[in-house]
Amino acid sequence: MRRLGPMICLSFLMCASAGPLAAQQYTVKFATVAPEGSSWMKIMREYDDAVRKESGGRMRFKVYPGGVQGKEQDVLRKIAIGQLQSGGFTGVGLGEIAPSVRILDAPFLFRSHDEVDRILTVFTGEFEKAYEANGYVLLGWAEVGFVHVFTNVEVKTPNDLSKLKMWTWEGDPIAGAAFKSLNMRPIPLTLENVLTSLQTGLLDAFYTSPYAALVLQWYTKAKYMVDVPIANAAGAVVVSKKYFDTLPKDLQDILVRNGRTYFRKLTETSRRENEDAVAEFKRRGITVIRTKEGDLKVYQDAGVSARKQLTGSMFTADLLQRVERELEQFRMSQKGGS
């Protein structure tokens, strides 16, 4: 009986030492260009907290924000070699994984958030298969929002855009097609060079969502914002399928289920904050340029032209036709219900 005491103590110590080992069994290294302190990162950390709690501490994220792991293409390369396992990407990075998903960023395609939601409802299954075929699992959509042109030169008509020293994200064919359709010759630069180029006068215009313009401080170099969005910028969080497949089924379920919840929350938050950012810009003296009815058709026609340019290289004609047809039917149903 005297030996039971030491044996019980030894068993307790073994169990106690096993706990922390189990708690650190799975660490998902995640990187994004989204800056620390932004709502994107706040909700990412909420997601991490939920995953830790529901997994009993067996899984957690190690987060690298603000582009510290490099550009989106750099993050994808690091995921491919196993240095990272997951990333939050804009359409630029998503297009590197599955080009067809860039239909979500197609120029002048969407006119409302309801339209975006409709297309995601109908086509997400198809996009998930495209991700998986290229080695990734979708954890959730994380929309950046409607993208507007900001400039320090007044733009009275669409023709005035051709005079701008406009930035375009280096290597992004979507923006290239949009600006080409508007007879513009933008200046390609990486994301981190935009603010400096605005400060030095290399650029006098850029495009992004209002909230991003606020967070990145780009708005401080703008006097005007064009009210017609040139696109809705998609975003998503994905994880390496190779890594995902090594996880126990319960952890896979925890990742995906919570991802759907928290990144939907992020999308809704982004939409509110984009609206709030526009209101803030107005308070700070930025003029929102209202587009005339006739000029609106110029933008819509430019969108048709740009989407044709992208057909074949980014998405198929069949996918484009199906998405446009779904949108047209949705718009008709909305009119009928009003």
Image (cartoon, rainbow, N blue to C red):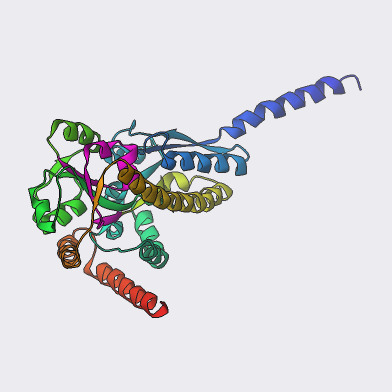
Left or right: 251 with respect to 8?
Answer: left
Q: Position of residue 14 (x, y in %)?
A: 71, 26
Is residue 236 at least partly visible in the picture? no
Q: Which quadrant: the N terminus?
A: top right
Q: Is residue 200 above or below residue 143?
A: above
Q: Quadrant of residue 98?
A: bottom left
Left or right: 141 with respect to 251?
Answer: left
Is residue 258 at least partly visible in the picture? yes
Q: Position of residue 79 (x, y in %)?
A: 36, 40
Residue lying at 37% horizontally and 35% vertically, measured from the top left: 35
Q: How many marks do you count on the picture?
A: 0
In the depicted view, which residue is nearer to us: 335 or 4?
335
In the depicted view, which residue is nearer to us: 234 or 212?
212
Q: Is residue 205 above or below residue 325?
A: above
In the depicted view, which residue is nearer to us: 183 or 258?
183
Residue lying at 37% horizontally and 61% vertically, measured from the top left: 113
Q: Position of residue 177 (x, y in %)?
A: 15, 56
Q: Quadrant of residue 15?
A: top right
Q: Residue furthest bottom?
A: 336
Q: Is residue 222 above or below residue 14?
A: below
In the depicted view, which residue is nearer to us: 265 or 101?
265
Residue lying at 43% horizontally and 41% vertically, measured from the top left: 39
Residue 239 painted magenta: no
Q: Which quadrant: the C terminus?
A: bottom left
Left or right: 130 with respect to 308?
Answer: right
Residue 210 painted magenta: yes
What is the span of residues highlighted in magenta in the rendered image?
204-232
Q: Position of residue 149 (x, y in %)?
A: 22, 49
